[in-house]
Amino acid sequence: MTLLPIVSHALIYGVILSAVLFTLILILTRINPEIMLKDYPPDIQAKYGPMSERSKRQRIPVAIFFIAVLFGIVAMSFQEVRTHASGDIPFLDAFVHLFVMFSIFNLLDWLVLDWLIVVAICPSFIILPGTEGLAGYKDYGFHFRGFLIGTVITFVTSILVAGVVAAVF
């Protein structure tokens, strides 16, 4: 498989991954925004205080569910890559596919979820009780730094997972 079809395929799955995870994140935040406390800017975390024991207990099954969904979408995405590669997936193909797919998620997370929904629109269900009006809710820089950190994580994760995929397939 040449790289162009891999990139095209990864772009599609990056959008699918984003749509699914954004939906889950927004539903989760609507149900209990405190579960996402560690993803809020520092001023909001400081004002809100520590996470409740209830939310701490909820984080583990929620994280397991999110990871299962993530792995499921990644596995589905590799089915077509494997078919086009006649069963063998070389490291470069796996890396490009993963890096593009995760980069699309990271980019859309930054621009759509963080900047558009969280900062610009800021629906009331995102605001933690007692933190209304804090500067962190309008902190574009916080989310941009998150995007940059996500880019590094995407690169490293893509290398590691591509190594596993190339070894297994």
Image (cartoon, rainbow, N blue to C red):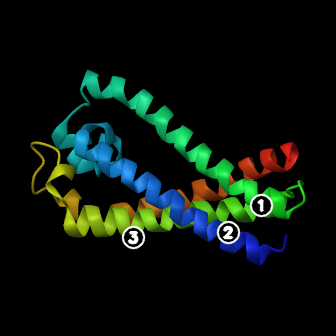
Residue, x 16% and y 42% (percent of image)?
47
Q: Earlier in the sequence, mark 3 or mark 2?
A: 2
Mark 2, secondary structure of its residue = helix
- 2 and 1 marks in contact (CB < 8 Å): yes
In this view, the residue in front, 122 or 69, is 69
In the rendered image, residue 36, in percent from the top left (x then y), is placed at 32, 42
Relative height, residue 121 to residue 133 (above, below): below
Q: Is residue 25 visible?
A: yes
Q: Is residue 20 left or right of residue 97?
A: left
Compared across the picture, whether 80 is left or right of 72 comes to right
Say whether residue 139 is visible. no
Q: Earlier in the sequence, mark 3 or mark 1?
A: 1
* Three-letter residue code for mark 1: Val
Residue 122 in the image: x percent, y percent? 20, 62
Q: Please give the residue where the numbered disc 3 appears in the rendered image.
A: 111
- The numbered dot on residue 81 is 1
Asked whether disc 3 touches disc 1, contact meaning CB atoms under 8 Å apart, the reply is no
Helix, strand or loop at label 1? It is helix
Please name the residue that numbered disc 2 is placed on: 9
Residue lying farthest to the bottom in this orientation? 4
Secondary element at tag 3: helix
Quarter where residue 62 is shown: top left
Which badge, 2 or 1, comes first in the chain's sequence? 2
Compute the Cα span from label 3 to label 1. 28 Å
How far across and down, in percent of the image, does residue 13 sit? 59, 63
What's the residue type where badge 3 is placed?
Leu
